[in-house]
Structures are given as C-alpha cells and as structure tokens.
Amino acid sequence: MANIIIVGTQWGDEGKGKIVDFLAEFADIVVRFQGGNNAGHTMVVNNEQFICHLIPSGIVQNKTCFIGNGVVVDPEVLVGEIDYLNNKGFPVDSNNLKISEKAHLILPYHKQIDIAREDKDGDKKIGTTGRGIGPSYEDKAARKGLRFVDLIDADVFCEKLKNIIKEKNFFLQHYLSADPLDSEKTIDQYSGYAERLAPHVADISVAIHRAIKKGKQILFEGAQGTHLDIDHGTYPYVTSSSTVAGNACCGAGIGPKEITGVMGIVKAYTTRVGRGPFPTELFDVTGDLIQKKGAEFGATTGRRRRCGWLDAVILKNSIRLNGLTGLGITKLDVLGGLETLHICTAYEYNGKILHDFPTDLKTLSGCKPIYETLPGWPEDISKIDNIDDFPKTTRNYLDRVEALAETPIDIVSVGPGRDETIMLRNPFL
Ligand code: GDP
Ligand code: IMO
Ligand code: MG
C-alpha cells in the first residue's frame, strides 16, 4: 500500500492540481492538509477546465476528499465550490467530502484585516491573495481562532464570535481605519454555512487511520510551494502555513510512518506571484514569451506571474526540506521554440559561489544566478506520449535536471490536460 504526498518545489502554481488529478486514479482518498483558498489548483479533463481552491483535486476523479485540520477554511468559498462542482456534474455530498472538525475558519474580519493591512503597508506589502489566510493562522496560533467544531454549535459560535469581534473591531477601526463588523450579521451569515456544512464535519484523523487500516491508498495534496513555507521560504514574503511534506502528517492527523513517498512538482521554468526575491527572474522578451506561452496568470487572483529560468538551487533546497522521492516535471511544452535554455546551478554573491539557498533576504536579493546553457528544441512536444519520442535536446534537458536533482523524474507533463502526461514510474505501484 502506498500513501503519497505531493508538494510544490518552487513558489506555487507548479501544476500540483493537474498531477494530483492524474494520480488520484490510483488513490482512494485525497487530502488537503494546509493553506486555504489562497490556492488555485487547475485540472483539465476532456478540454474542460476546473479550478479548485479548497476541495482536493481528487474530486474530478470522483474520489473521496478530505480537508484536514491544518487547512483554514472560508465557509463561504467552500459552499460556493460545492455548488460549482455540483453544477459541473461532479456531485459533492457528505459521503465524498469530509472536513476536519479541527480546521480553523476564515471569518470576515480575517479578510478585512488582510486587505487593510496590505493597503497600509504600501510598498512593503507581501502581495497576499487577500483571502484572510495570514490573519486566520495568526488567530490559530494566538488561540483565538474559531473551528468547525465551534461553527456547528450555534451557542458556542455566538459566544466566541461576540467576544473576539470586539477586539477585531477595535483593531480594524483604530489601527487600520477600516469599517467595523456587525456581529449579528456575521452570526446570521455563518449559521447558514453551518447548516450546509455540518453533515461534512468529521474527525479526519480517525477517518484516515481507519482507511489506511483497510488498505486504502491516500494522496496528500500540498498547496503553495516550498519557498512560500512559513519557516523555510523567503520570509516574510511567504504564506502563513508550513507547506513542506512534513506538515502533511500534522495537518491531516497521522504519523510519518504511514508515508511511502513524496513527489515534488517542478515547473520546467520558475514562476512567482506576489512580491519577494526571485534570483532567476527574467525581465526581457524571453520572460514575456514564457509568461504568454505558459498563460502564467494566477488561478486565484488573476495576477500576472513573474517568470524566470529553472533554479536548481531552490530545487535542491526542496529535495532536502521535503525528502523528495520523485519529481513531477510540468509545462515542459512551454519551453519549446526557445533556441537556448538556462538552468541556474549556483549563485554568485559578492565574489563567492553559493550552492545553498541563503536565508538572509539581503543576501538572496544580491545573488546572481550562475547558468548552465543547454540547447532548446523547436518541435511541439505536447502530443508526445512516450519519453523515447522526445527530441534529443528535450531528453538532454530532463537528464540534466535529474542529474542536478539526484532524484528520479516520475512524471513529465506536456500540456494542461489529464492525458498530456507521461508516467515513468507510478509512485502508487
Ligand atoms: P497549482 O497551483 O500547482 O495546482 O498550479 P495552477 O493550477 O495554479 O497553475 C498551473 C497552470 O498550468 C494551470 O493553468 C494548468 O492548467 C497549467 N498546466 C499544468 N501542467 C501543464 C503542462 O504540462 N503544460 C501546460 N502548457 N500547462 C500546464
Ligand atoms: P497554489 O496552491 C502561488 C502567495 C501570494 C503571496 C504569498 C502570501 O495555487 O500553488 P497569502 O494570501 O497566502 O497570505 O499570500 O503567497 N501565494 C501563492 N502563490 N500559488 C499559491 O497557491 C499561493 N498561495 C499563496 O501570492 O505572495
Ligand atoms: Mg495555483
């Protein structure tokens, strides 16, 4: 039996949704374990596109989906996503979607604080998605959060909300110069969500444990990317959760001995949305070309993604931080038509060669990438379904990535569609 974690190795949007959808065929349950609706995971099946922000990408394979305790959930968004999938012909009910009773809620003041704080911070802002993710995790750590277990108990919810809203309104009005919230209105609104979502609320840890005992296979779907991790990313230009594989256990409520593999998703180049250092970022026509050909716009906020070459320094950082056992390379087709390709193998900083990703942002911002140059390929590879049919230079590029990563490539993706995927080794078998 196999239980596999999928994580992003870069700054998010590596194509995790697509690979999770593809691999979900071999799993029984797909579990989200961190983040919230800052995530935007895209699946394309039979030319139809689906974007999920909270519900695991296994839903389009009609798999059972769990939202773990480590996720912060905006009930309004979740209800909307259930309706969206139902309308698309993918029924979501209390049998195939379960939400941890321990998962924290995103409340209206979290979104308001997120947006008002970014406004106030001006050019020092993080560039968040404005979905209230940070403020919700802040409350969790401060032990002021409300959880699903509270949402489904009207009296408890009412009492806790009335208490906290006093503090939030003070902060909103007097520090952020924003409008205060009406607690009665929020209670009213959330009682509607409670009614809708109560049948889905469960003890996810127990449910996963029982499923594993019965021999079921679990796929854990990471959100964001390793370099947006609260501890290991480019702090403070990060998200507010732990995005690395180790957190799959904590955010789902299981022990590490159940995990049999960790796949890191690697875009064949690098993108970043939001602010923060990005050593291989391109500011030239090649960057624009990749951005256009790769349709690099955020799946959550629609913002243009910054684009650059593949960075093996951050890839190696991810391999160590996540204990990756295999790689899934995505968007290889996008590089087609470029005469030469570059892979960053180290950084140069003040005359010194750095092989490890530096912590200090001042250092990182001053790092110049050292590139290795490889020949590109003019051919369109998006219809190729066997790695042996790739042009020699495409094979070359993959071989070089694998050699630099010292980790096997398990999957190569050559288009957004589920069938535009070449599997070299199935982690579930
Ligand atoms: P995620 O957040 O990691 O799930 O990634 P997103 O869904 O935000 O962004 C990835 C984008 O690339 C989506 O629009 C996908 O449909 C698309 N995509 C995924 N894999 C491929 C691929 O191999 N080739 C191309 N051209 N597009 C891809
Ligand atoms: P998926 O799962 C790319 C970025 C935001 C911002 C920073 C903090 O689709 O890969 P937040 O709203 O989390 O407080 O914003 O993190 N960010 C993402 N970037 N993909 C994501 O998710 C992201 N989720 C958050 O742009 O820079
Ligand atoms: Mg995304």
Image (cartoon, grey):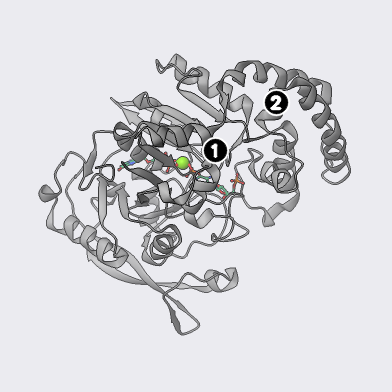
Q: Amino acid at mark 2?
A: Leu
Mark 1 or 2: in front is 2
* Image spot of residue 84 (x, y percent): 49, 20
Label annotation for residue 301? 1
State the SS at label 2: helix
Near mark 2 (Cα within 10 A), the count class, few <14, some 14-19 or many ≥20, is: many
Label annotation for residue 220? none
* Image spot of residue 203 (x, y percent): 56, 31
- The verdict on label 1 being within 8 Å of ligand 2 is yes
Q: Left or right of 386: which side holds 3?
A: right
Hey, which quadrant is residue 149 in on the image?
top right
Reply above or below: 243 against 18. Answer: below
Reply above or below: 393 against 179. Answer: below
Disc 1 from disc 2: Cα separation = 27 Å
Q: Quadrant of ligand 1?
A: top left
Instruction: Specify the quadrant that holds the N terminus.
Output: top left
Q: Residue at x 67, y 53 (%)?
A: 125
State the SS at label 1: loop
